Amino acid sequence: MNGLESLSTALIELDEDLTLRLTGEILAEGEVAPLAILQACQQAMRVVGERYERREYYLAGLILAGELFKAILDLVQPYQEDAQGVEHAGTIVLGTVAGDIHDIGKNMFGTALRTFGFTVADLGVDVSAERFLEEVGRLHPDLVCMSGLITTAYHSMKATVELLRAHAPALRYVPPIVLGGATIDEEVCRYTGADSWSTDAMEGVRICQRLVAARGKRSL
Ligand code: B12
């Protein structure tokens, strides 16, 4: 088993000490890109979720997995490139939608966006459609990005898309809307009426870059 596989197994087994020790060792060796570590851990989180679904893990397992992933992020962050010298790529309003408090993936995506020069207004979690509308009206961003992982989130996303579009005349411009989070797919995207979606932070950044390029970026 290579280092990443061992790390993934340790995270799936919720072995706190081993997970943090292996993360530290892999980072110190410097042979694996920080992003690859996070991608492996993201896959491991899916397995934790599946075990929860099969009732092999309980809520405490989800909570511990979340805490472990945050600790891994803290260890990996200093090794990631920062945005120094990167040209302003556009402005994004980001949030986890109403009824949903999952924020690990949203925060990772926000960090990736900033690394590539985007200015991100992160509204946090459990963000109502009205709050999104308020911030879009205030900031006139290039894009709106919504994160959500539970079924309830799909309805909140749809309600937010509809509210923003209903206010198109007052806003003058409704920016493209991008969805993300482990359980989002094409069907959810179609249901909500959003413009694009991804379950991967880096792919999400590329989608945002393409959408901004298609129209030309705006400044705050
Ligand atoms: C950790 C976790 C929790 C933690 C969250 C801690 C936190 N601060 O976020 C806690 C314990 C709080 C939790 C609670 C619950 N959870 Co939970 N949770 C998970 C778990 C295991 C991992 C989520 C995670 O952090 N993944 C790692 C991150 C990095 O991945 P990610 O979120 O997908 O993000 C990546 C991409 O999607 C992308 N991305 C993220 N956002 C965006 C946005 C845009 C625009 C773009 C482009 C990209 C993008 O970038 C990230 C990096 O690549 C998932 C399982 C899974 N499949 O992921 C279940 C899961 C999401 N949870 C689930 C459930 C059921 C719950 C609860 C209802 C449990 C309960 N009975 O209370 C509650 C809901 C609480 C609520 N109201 O929100 C289910 C949802 C099923 C469903 N379809 O409804 C899942 C899928 C588990 C399962 N398989 O059953 N959970």
Image: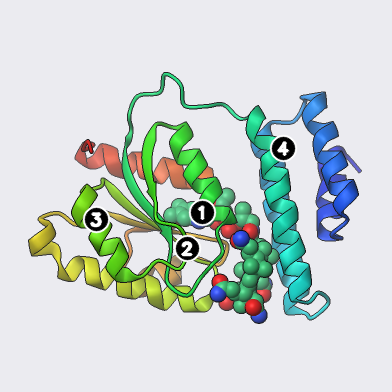
**Amino acid at circle 2:** Val
Q: Residue at x 27, y 54 (%)?
A: 176
**Amino acid at circle 1:** Lys
Q: Earlier in the sequence, mark 3 or mark 2?
A: 2
Q: Earlier in the sequence, mark 3 or mark 4?
A: 4
Q: Tell me which corner region of the image, top left, top right, bottom left or bottom right, holds residue 48.
A: bottom right
Along the viewing direction, whichever of 206 and 112 lies nearer the viewer: 112
Q: Residue at x 45, y 58 (%)?
A: 124
What secondary structure is found at the residue carrying circle 1?
helix
Residue beneath disc 2: 125
Please say if 55 is above or below 196.
below
What secondary structure is found at the residue carrying circle 4?
helix
Report the side of 188 relative to 102 (left or right): left
Q: How crowded is mark 1: few (under 14 residues within 10 Å), some or many (20 or more)?
A: many
Residue 175, image x, y percentages: 23, 53
Q: Nearer the viewer, mark 2 or mark 1?
A: 2
The quarter in which the C terminus is drawn is top left
Residue 69, image x, y percentages: 71, 52
**Amino acid at circle 4:** Leu
Report the disc number at residue 106. Answer: 1
Q: Distance between the residues labelled 1 and 3?
A: 18 Å
Q: Residue at x 51, y 41 (%)?
A: 111
Whether the residue under disc 2 has CB within 8 Å of ligand 1: yes
Q: Distance between the residues labelled 2 and 1?
A: 9 Å
Whether the residue under disc 1 has CB within 8 Å of ligand 1: yes
Does residue 200 appear in this view?
no
Contact between marks 2 and 1 (CB within 8 A): the answer is yes
Report the disc number at residue 136. Answer: 3
Q: How crowded is mark 2: few (under 14 residues within 10 Å), some or many (20 or more)?
A: many
Does residue 68 appear in this view?
yes
Residue beneath disc 4: 75
**Amino acid at circle 3:** Val
